[in-house]
Amino acid sequence: MTQTFGRKPFRLMIDQAVPMRDGVRLSADLYLPTQGGPFPALLLRTIYDNQEPRYLAWTRRFVQAGYAVVLQDCRGRHDSEGAWDPYLCELEDGFDTHEWVGRQPWCDGNVGTFGLSYPGFTQTLPATLRSKYLKALVPIASQQDNYGHHRVDGVIHHAVSLFFANMMGRTMQRNALEQLDQNQFYRKLPLISALDDIGDNPYYRGVIEHERYDEWWSRYSLRNRYAQVECPALFITGWFDSLLHETLQVFNGWRSRARAEHARRLTKLIVGPWSHQTAPWGREPFDPQGRFEELTFGPQAAEDAAEMHLRWYDARLKGKDDGIDSEPPVRLFIMGANEWRFENEWPLQRAAQASFYLAGNGSSPQGGRLMTEPPGDENPDTFTYDPAHPVPSWGAQYQTLDLSGPRERSHLQERADVLIYTSEVLTRDVEVTGPVSATIYAASSAPDTDFTAALVDLHPDGRSIILCEGIRRARFRKGTDRPELMQPGSWYQFHVDMWDTSNLFKAGHRIRLEISSSNFPRYDRNLNTGGPIGYETIWQVAEQTIYHDEVRPSRIDLPVIPPTPRQTPRYTPAGARSE
């Protein structure tokens, strides 16, 4: 069957049966150039829909550039046979598909892969089986494993887990989810049965039941599989992506522990000012001016997603010297400066840790202060956390279609259960690039509770733009393998991993830290009782105390980058491709 794709013809073969080792056949649509061949092949394996507009648009570009494209439904999804066992079935099915594609007469023996989110994981996991045909991966927003995605330091990534579990049917059960009242849906208790009205969801129950990293999580994790990898990868993510933290871990694992030297040396990372959906690969067209609702990063933020792929594939699959291999391995978008910069590693070795200590009254209308000197004798701050009225998730790496990203937070900072601490007006630019964390000394009237922290860029016009955030469950303060409830009224030290960012706080701006006890529905509410997580149906109000004195110096630690001569990125601009 021959159809026209743009101005160039292509051959389309629909619903090709790809045999797996157990006899199950997976459905794939093939898009092939009509002239020449054999071709290097590019493979997408997806649980969603291989007819998604973004993937069809990329396919057109890939075919025009001389690649065969294979769009495959994963096992048990859409037109493919078998039963879908989330994540577990992708190891052998991915390898068997690599082998099948590489042996086809229209393939020259070179296979690359692409895809976002779950389709990112369908690339990385089977790469550990090392098909001789697999030569290049491009995982966008992928994860090391789901313990770092559906659980974050033991806390349930609530909105993510519920959304993913809603897809347990053969196709996405959007209708079932849309018929529910979203607010009531997220608040249903106990969590273990929250999806019972939709149907049987064994994967979701597993997320609730396995609060520690155990065999249920590790059976498909990459943590102990990096040394089995021989194929280089180009990892792509965004500063506001819900899988940012995971992607950075996979990149470092690949870069430092891959079995083959060329895989370690050639693996690269791109991080832009994007979220999981608001990006050049999003379901909706990315704004050409790099605009989010409340902040603009400029046209340089609007990368050409297909071009990023093709430049990598040309080097890996066609052997073209397009300059990509001579570039440093990391390319970052520095927000605030709104420019791209190459780096040699992640985190940046030249980053200097700068501590900003809490001082003053964080609950007053103007808030407390962030000081570069440790505090002296100061009174603690207090607030009340009521699980019936949690702080709503708003911006940063919250995985939604419309609430993630650099959102303005002033309305949240007016809440009585949100403390704010702000630096003096900056007299010079301060770049923060790297992992961000907070150390909070606190007490609670409850045996268990949560403490949250958010890094905010306070603009001269009053906009409070969130950059990154984190949460710490009190019972997991010593680690998820050593849960321990608190003695109410006693103070403890809590480390809050606030994930990562890259932002230039410009002169005239101020650095702000928010502290609270909830971030809902991004994370599940701590009901403050100390009962089994996911099985509780009642809650209690907690009275929280935040200390910032000489003995208990609560602070935020920022990776500050010393001013250096800026490096000019060298990459082929869109449209400069040679056929």
Image (cartoon, helix red, strand yellow):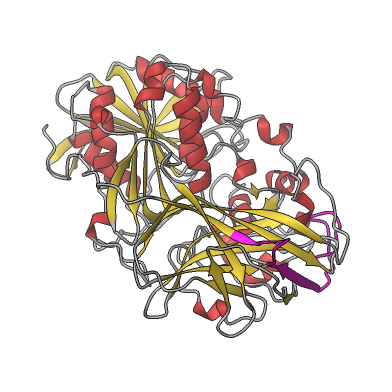
Residue under the image location 85 percent in, 63 percent down: 490
> Is 293 located above or below residue 87 in the figure?
below
Quarter holding the C terminus is top left
Find residue 539 and report its image quarter: bottom right
Provide the major secondary structure of the magenta segment: loop
> Is 102 located above or below residue 53 in the figure?
above
Q: Where is residue 236 in the image (x, y as percent from the top left)?
A: 39, 42
- Residue in front for this viewpoint, 181 or 533: 533
Magenta residues span: 526-555
**Total label count?**
0
Q: Can residue 578 be seen in this view?
A: yes
Q: Where is residue 139 in the image (x, y as percent from the top left)?
A: 42, 37
Residue under the image location 45 percent in, 32 percent down: 27
- Residue in front for this viewpoint, 252 or 439: 439
Q: Where is residue 28 in the image (x, y as percent from the top left)?
A: 40, 32
Residue under the image location 29 percent in, 16 percent down: 105
Quarter holding the N terminus is top left
Left or right: 574 as drawn, with respect to 160: left
Left or right: 135 as drawn, with respect to 66: right
